[in-house]
Each structure stands twice: as structure tokens, then as C-alpha cells.
Amino acid sequence: MVHPRPLRFSFPLRATVLAGAALTLLVGCGGDDGPGDRQVSVQFAGQVNGQELVCGKTYSNVGLGQPGTYQVNDWRFYVHDVALVRADGSRQTVALNQDGAWQYQNVALLDLRKNCGSGALPTNAVTAGTVPNDNYSGICFKVGVPFSLNHINDATAPSPLNNTGMLWNWQGGRKFIRVDGFGNPGSVDGAVAFVVHLGSTGCPGPGANSPPTAACTYPNVAEFCLDNFNADQDRVVMDMGKALAGSNVALNTANTASGCMSGNADPECIPILPRLNLDFTYVAGAGATPEKYPKVIPPVLFSVGKP
């Protein structure tokens, strides 16, 4: 995967927006609430093997091999097409509030880095919007950015699609998931950078600084549905320990990206992308026979967190 080029802009968030964006979001995507509508805020959380995300904390028994220790220093991801599910299986799309910071059209950015820097970082752990006042028992959503928005010009993209840390380039689009970390932290042999960056690959075009000319070969947009979910009290839990369960986080193949950056020639992606609810095609090099690795069923990355 091509690394991002220098960018010409910054993420436009003011302190007053940051203080209130996660809790009080403006109504949009259709204006004011209708007479039978209600607001809903879906809470998200990060965990590693069932333990709450704390940047800099050393987690044990992560993946395969020894010592199996891992630290996280970045955790962000996009979701879109968030919908609540009725008992009969019908879906109701959440009309996301257009807050000018974390949500745009049907896309939301979840940013769980609140304690990942030397000072306070902008964070957001909710998707908020309106739904008809009905009974719901599940939730569905897609991880990623839809093609129509993924490859828009980064210099003019609205927030949160202009988040600099989530950009690859115009052709490749955005990182759908960005989790950065180190395997074997504090070791005398040295920590190993091991990240999970999910995004589209095989996007045809004249170059990195131009939009793709056709759909990407591997869109890498994954859908997740969770049952027994009460949006008024439950959380959607993303556990990266589950995504890394088949990986040795203290080992990275020479001359490849650190960890998995979605490249189809990167062996570190073989155990990871199927655990992100995606089929993965591995091609070792020119002329090599493609190897198919199906998604793990049932999906393991997300679960319902009860109060």
C-alpha cells in the first residue's frame, strides 16, 4: 500500500466542538426530528482481549508466540450505513446528525485516542442520529467509507473525511481502520511496530494523486450485525485482541509494511483480514498463484457490551 503524501490541511476542530461533539450533536440528514422520531446515540468502545483500551498499557497473551505482549497508541475507524434492527429483521437506517466534525452524510468517525498522546486528543465514541420511535433489538453497520466518498479530493473534503491521520492518498482513499501498536514492548531485543490499517486495494488509476478510474478490486468494506442490542444502554465493543488472535505481533516479515496495511502481498494480512469479516486474497508476487482465505464465521471483531 502506498504511504500518504504530505498533506496541506489540518483537521478543523475547535475546542468548543470537541467538548460537546461526543454528547450533543446537531440534527441533520433530513432536518428536525419528525413527530414520531427519537434521538439515538450508539456507544462504541475499544478492548484488547476483553480489557478496556488504555493507550500505553501492556496487554498479555495477544496473538500467537511469545511473549504475546502488545501496546496500542492509536485507534480510529470509520463506520457507515448504521441501522437499528427490529425483531422481524427489518432495518431502520439511523439518520446521522450532521455535526460538522464527526459525521457527514451516512459516515461517522470513531476516535478512541483520548489518552493516546502527551495531552488531550480529540475523541468521539458515539454515532448519533434519529430513528422512528419503535422497538429495536439489533444493530448493523459497515466499517469503512463508501466508494462515492472514499476517494473525494482530500484538500476539500468535509470533516471527518479530512482527518489527516486516516488518509492514504487520493487513489487509495481513507484508512477504514487505524490501530497502531507495538509487539513485545520494552524488550531488550526491541519492540516491533505492528499495526492494522484497513483500506481498499487494487484501485485502478493513473497514479496516487488522482482518483481511481473504476471500482477497487478489493473494496474491503465489512458489514457487521449484532443481535440482542439495546441502543439506549449497550455498547458496540471492538476487540483488537480478536483481530490479532492468529498473529505474532512481535514478528514482521522483512521488506513488508509494519503489521498489516491491507496489501495483498503482505503475509501478515493473512490471519488478520479474515478476522475483520473479509475474504482475503494473498498473492506472494508477480506470477504467483493467488491464495484465498475466507472470512472467519461467525465474525469476531465486534460484540455487544452490556452495562
Image: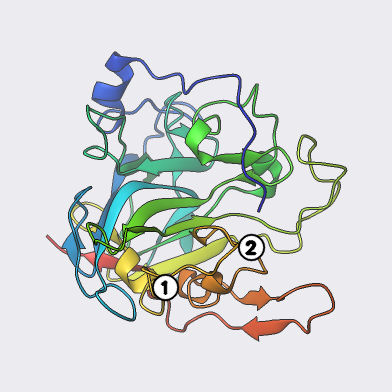
Q: Quadrant of the C terminus?
A: bottom left
From where the camera sits, is residue 230 visible? no
Task: Check disc 1 and give the amino acid type.
Answer: Asp
Q: Which residue is mark 1?
A: 88
**Residue displayed at 22% across by 54% down:** 53
User: Helix or strand or loop: what does disc 1 sit on?
Assistant: loop
Looking at the image, is mark 1 or mark 2 nearer the viewer?
2
Looking at the image, residue 231 lies above or below residue 101: below
Residue 167 in view (yes/no): yes
Image location of residue 171, percent across then percent down: 74, 43
In the image, residue 150 lies at what x, y percent? 65, 43
Badge 1 density bin: few <14, some 14–19, many ≥20, Cα 10 Å: few
Q: Position of residue 189 (x, y in %)?
A: 30, 63
- The answer to whether 96 is drawn above or below residue 244 in the figure is above
Relative side of 286 to 252, left or right: right
Q: Quadrant of residue 161?
A: top right
Q: Residue 33, position in %: x, y?
A: 39, 32
